[in-house]
Image: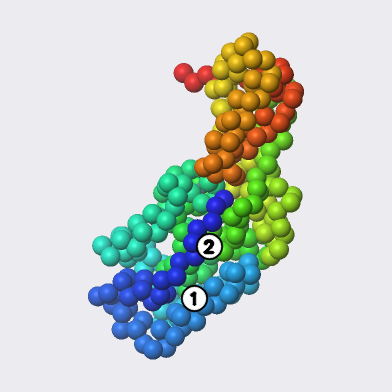
Amino acid sequence: MYELNLPNENPLSIFNCLTRNHPLMMQLYSQEMINTVNFFDEIYRIKGSTASLYTLPTCKITFRSTTTKDEMEKLYNNRLVKSKGGKIIYQSIMNSAINKTCPLCSLRLVSTLDHYLPKAHYPQYAISRKNLYPACIECNKSKLDTVSSKKAEQTFHPYFDTLRGVNWLLATYHSSPTPKLVFYINNAVTNKFYLRDRMEFHFKKLSLGELYSTYAANELASIKYNLQLIYEKKGSNGIRRYLHKEYISASAVNKNSWKTVFYLTLSNSSVFCSSGFNNISDIRFP
Ligand SMILES: [Zn+2]
């Protein structure tokens, strides 16, 4: 999980672009419609800033009685994703990801746009900029079209949930039967607006613990030989120093990556540094 800057574009700019030469243009562009789009955008901002988006009503008809859910979904699927002007907007949102990395898992490549409030249930936000951010396809699918009914059961919102400076990811080291790491959300994270509860919900819903543990297992196997060489020359203190340097290096990029927490946890384990590394499971791909 990592945060993105809250988009501050005029909410009508996407509508302007996507409805150009569109049959819906005339009915969409009434003053009533413009007022409604601005109103919905402001409501989204207020609800998002207090983690209350789950209280918004699901709608089948949007903006005006003549603008249906299907029409809003088509504006997204046919215009934002496929039209010339839409593709430019789509790509600019994709480009907001840091190093093409998904803000929901902080690991896999972004490959799609995710609707925080699913367009199947909230068509009024199908092409809302504040509701759209880049994500990997796995996180996008894991969220599904779920509608939350409880504050604590909402996933992390990259535009509204502030994590900067917070060490939210931790792991425990398990030595038996073979070394492994189990990742979890730091209990010290504030629970204001149910942030910690929601991060734990997000972590579970998107299976991030399993994902990070798998990467950790591969990393353990890949450093085993190197650790044995270091131990021969410099003993357990040499191993601890090596792991700590790797932690500092990874932390400079992202203090909450699985890799940062991996090296921090191992460098703090006297069991691992003294002899535990010898029990690392071998992983060999053909
Ligand atoms: Zn992801």
Indicate the position of residue 147 as horizontal and vertical percent values.
Answer: 60, 63
Residue 178 seen: no
- Give me the residue at 24% from left, 75% from top: 21
- Give me the residue at 57% from left, 64% from top: 160
Q: Quadrant of residue 176?
A: top right
Indicate the position of residue 187 as horizontal and vertical percent values.
Answer: 74, 50
- Disc 2 residue type (three-letter): Tyr
Residue 247 vs residue 279: left or right?
A: left
Residue 6 vs residue 29: left or right?
A: right
Q: Nearer the viewer, residue 51 or 141?
A: 51
Numbered label attached to residue 159: 2
Q: Nearer the viewer, residue 210 or 47?
A: 47
Indicate the position of residue 76 as horizontal and vertical percent values.
Answer: 38, 65
Which badge, 2 or 1, is on the more N-terminal residue?
A: 1
Nearest-to-viewer mark from 2 and 1: 2
- Which residue is denoted by mark 1 in the rendering? 41
Q: Quadrant of residue 227?
A: top right
